[in-house]
Image (cartoon, helix red, strand yellow):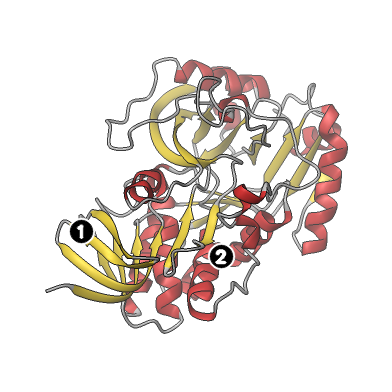
Amino acid sequence: MADTADVVVVGGGVNGASIAWALASQGVKRVVLCEKGALASGASGRSSALVRMHYTNETDARLAFASFPIFRHWIELMGGGPPVFTHTGFVNVVSPPYAEHLRKNVDVLRKIGINTVALSPTELRDLQPHANVDDIGAAAYEPDSGYANPAETVEGLRRRATELGARILQWTPVTKILRRESRAVGVETRAGRIDAGAVVVAAGAWAPRLCRAMGLEIPARVKGIDTVVVTRPAELAEPHVIFIDNVQGSYFRPESGILTIVGVPCQDWDLDPDAPLSLPPEAPAVGAQILTHRMPTMERATLARGYRAFDCYSHDRHAILGRVDGLDGLYLATAFSGSGFKIAPAVGMCLAELILDGRAKTVDIEPFSLNRFAAGRSPEGPYPYASRGDQAEPKNAAGAGDQVTRRP
């Protein structure tokens, strides 16, 4: 006999857990989340979990802005548990040709209500004396921002969702999304069928495969994300601010007092998310080059560890959120393109609103709808920064002709 639910959420990363929490918070009695392994065992558990609001488009920025208070006031809003947010401050730096774009983006973000200011290279050096600013044209500074503990964030969402009545089924792979003509009616799992009024696919790198099996092609591909961690030298004992370095197409942030995490550009596409995770041998050297260019004192840092994750990247490098036209009861929250952690609380609230009320109210997520691709639309704003080479489509692959703006 089949199990039943009002909503089934497929995927136990930060966005899936957030959707389950938001639905249960809105009074949905039968919420079931299915995760193929342990919660946060995919990209979420290996996320660098930046909590910042600087984007080159207003909709992403509004999602991050709506999520920010939840990270900052976690214990109060989640009804207990350990805090998940560490305050460091954040800068986004660009090369001189994009300085004016950055200043215009800062103006847009300030109008939203975000606490941010544009800095000159000299002002950035005053803020971070160890930074090399020779190739920087401007920086956007967010003094309130920082990073989250990814595992504790997902665990806190799980705990609160469970307290509110949701069922979280770990080690329960969804093998098929069930449809009857033009409607999603549930899922098939290794443990049996679950009939449901709505299904939300929040399965990250596994989403394209799962959707394809039910006859839905989503314009997204699986890509590797590589990260290395170093122990800072004594001269950098005090944590630095978080950097998104658009000049180099990367980022780095402090971790646990003496460590720094750096994102290593990765160009491995169309990977099998069930394959063993293996960091390329050249990644530590590349990470060291990124760090020492921006902070020369990092030459005396030592390698601590490194790791790889898989994520789902859409063709325009923005999330795919919302209902699926022609398939009633099916919703997508996927293809976050390496940038989904910081917006997860608002994504959860928006998907819950969309399912229950027919539209998202916290933030208008229509710019992220699946039908934007057929219509030739993108959420990207008018003032982009330099394209990231590691996010460009491989030349010999489908969709290689798409020219899209990349985001770190």
Q: Between residues 237 and 399, which one lies in front from this camera angle? A: 399
For the point 43% across and 51% down, the residue is: 150
Dot 1 alpha-carbon crowd within 10 angstroms: few under 14, some 14 to 19, many 20 or more: some
Closer to viewer: mark 2 or mark 1: 1
Dot 2 alpha-carbon crowd within 10 angstroms: few under 14, some 14 to 19, many 20 or more: many
* Helix, strand or loop at mark 2: helix
Q: What is the quadrant of residue 17 in the picture? A: bottom left
Total tally of numbered discs in the picture: 2
Residue identifier under label 2: 346
Residue 365 appears in the picture as rendered: yes
Residue 290 picture location, percent across and down: 60, 22
Amino acid bearing label 1: Thr
For the point 46% across and 62% down, the residue is: 83
CB of mark 2 within 8 Å of CB of mark 1? no
Residue 275 picture location, percent across and down: 28, 32
Q: Is residue 26 left or right of residue 111?
A: left
